[in-house]
Amino acid sequence: MQTAADAGDAATLLAAVPAGRRVALVDPRFVGHVHALRLGLTDPRFAAATVPGALTAQPEARGALLRALRHTTAAVGAGAPVVEPEADPAPEDRTVPGRIAVALEAEGTAVKRPELGSLTAAVPTDAGARATAESARDAVDDEAVRLRSAVKAHDGFFTTFAISPYSRYIARWCARRNLTPNQVTTASLITALVAAGAAATGTRGGYVAAGILLLVSFVLDCTDGQLARYSLQYSTMGAWLDATFDRAKEYAYYAGLAIGAVRGGDDVWVLALGAMVLQACRHVVDFSFNEANHDAIANTSPTAALSGKLDSVGWTVWARRMIVLPIGERWAMIAVLTALTTPRIVFYALLVGCSLAACYTTAGRLLRSLTRKARRTDRAAQALADLADSGPLAQGVAAIAPGLRGGFTAPAVALIGTLVMIGGALFLPYGSWLTVAAAAVYVLLSGLAVARPLKGALDWLVPPFFRAGEYVTILVLAARSDVPHAVPAAFGLVSAVAYHHYDTVYRIRGGTGAPPQWLVRTIGGHEGRTALVAVLAAVLTHASGFTTALTALAVAVALVVLVESIRFWVSSSAPAVHDEGELA
């Protein structure tokens, strides 16, 4: 920390700081809470940020900061009053940091101004103002505010009332011991994997231990995000790890339950895979809808307005959050049912609960889409195209097709293709080449669905239809094959493909774009993988070769996707983020 005599001296001192370091300016008259300074000066998500009396700039904004500081120095004179006579700025903009923030914004550099709430940050100009600011500071416990703000603003009922009241203190304990959110996230993953292993024993004691460990894993899952907010340790990789590990933990636990059930004489692999498919399809509905409307222009909807009115009625807020069976309620249900009942009952409860939740959320999104007046942007259309995961076959069809027209054409074509594919897998004789013909129709219609930009009101349904087409086809063909271990192999294949789809979502959310096209081409796209599984089912009808083929395909997809994903996230230079995530 260095003290500058005036704005000109500050510019000299800042220019001497190594280029790769964050810098901050703080008015020496500053009076306020330490946490107010933390919010303004240490959050890594923003290139520049300010609170009254303080300003920070990341390396990428250092040049703009120096230019703004020199401009301010030239305008008011080194050591001169910082307010021009004709100007009447806000009080926070009358200091040198405030003036520089205004100059930065005028130049085009975004400056974050965090909400301070009850926290104090002021630059008093006389003794009376200083006494007032100090009194306001002393009246508020900034540590209590810091703990409250560590909890996610919008969370489920179970998480809010059963976990967060004490997990925030675990987060503070971790922060005081210099533990990072990523370390807590990893601990949560390991705990969940141990829980899956306990469930796989197939014993009552194992099930009880599994339920307890799953809840412990969820506590740690809440703690990592709270630690990130408490200590402002945000990163792109942290958000990716948190979101990806949530999926890995849940689906690994499904596999553990299925293994345990088999050891107890009850094969529930079809139910386990069905639960994973349903949950993954629920997620892609949320992802696709949100990306389609991320930056929609002229976005209005009577349904959204009604939802806004209901937000003022407290009990409806919690009811609507619980009805979607978010991760807290879902994991609590899984844990309790695992300890007290059987894996089959756990999966029945999951399938029924998630089906009802899916109907509720999808109906709401359909109503919003049909009643809103919005024009989708090119960015939204590209995000939907990336989420569609079209491979070379569909892309080839799209390239030669003129593209069908009409507001609802794309989702209608995708739905027809999905129904043809699933219907063929479900109702045609197993191993029939007619199923391969159905796959050819699916490929053709998949290409037609993405032959034009996805800007229609319901075009966000295209990726969910494709996910259902691929996942359900794999499930049905494996279940009907009557080949030993085919369904567990299919579980592995869907897991690998789902990882790729989740990874695509989090890359888009991190502002880094979708995975490279070579990766999508290498693993075939959704239509290529679906057609390949249909061909394998027709060729390998009466041998364990179908299981071997599914396993080999799962391993190949997993290796390619994981290697590229890990390489990308480890080397990513994307700006730091903290993803609050969906309730589900």
Image (tube, rainbow, N blue to C red):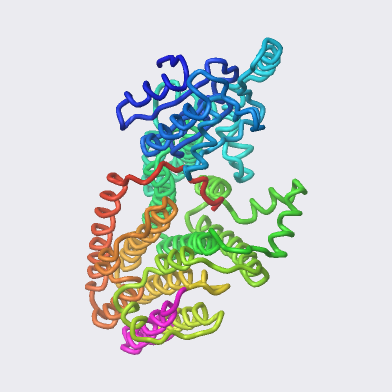
Residue at the image point whose x is 65% and y is 32% from the top: 86
The reply to whether residue 170 is visible in this rendering is: no
Magenta region, residue range? 425-453
The quarter of the picture where the N terminus appears is: top left
**Predominant secondary structure, magenta span:** helix
User: Up-down: is 258 above or below 137?
Assistant: below
Position of 266 compared to 549: left or right?
right
User: Up-down: is 528 above or below 32?
Assistant: below
Q: Quick check: is 436 in the magenta stretch?
A: yes
The reply to whether residue 72 is visible in this rendering is: yes
User: Up-down: is 373 above or below 408?
Assistant: above
Residue at the image point whose x is 61% and y is 46% from the top: 156
Image x and y of residue 125, in percent: 64, 16
Q: Quick check: is 581 in the magenta stretch?
A: no
Q: Between residue 164 and residue 1, name the one nearer to us.
A: 1
Position of 346 compared to 391: left or right?
right
Image x and y of residue 243, in percent: 44, 48
Image x and y of residue 224, in percent: 46, 36
Q: Between residue 228 and residue 80, name the one nearer to us.
A: 80
Image x and y of residue 11, in percent: 40, 25
Residue 140 position by quadrant: top right
Label total for image: 0
Residue at the image point whose x is 56% and y is 24% from the top: 82
Residue at the image point whose x is 64% and y is 51% from the top: 321
Q: Between residue 201 and residue 15, name the one nearer to us.
A: 15
Q: Between residue 101 and residue 343, name the one nearer to us.
A: 101
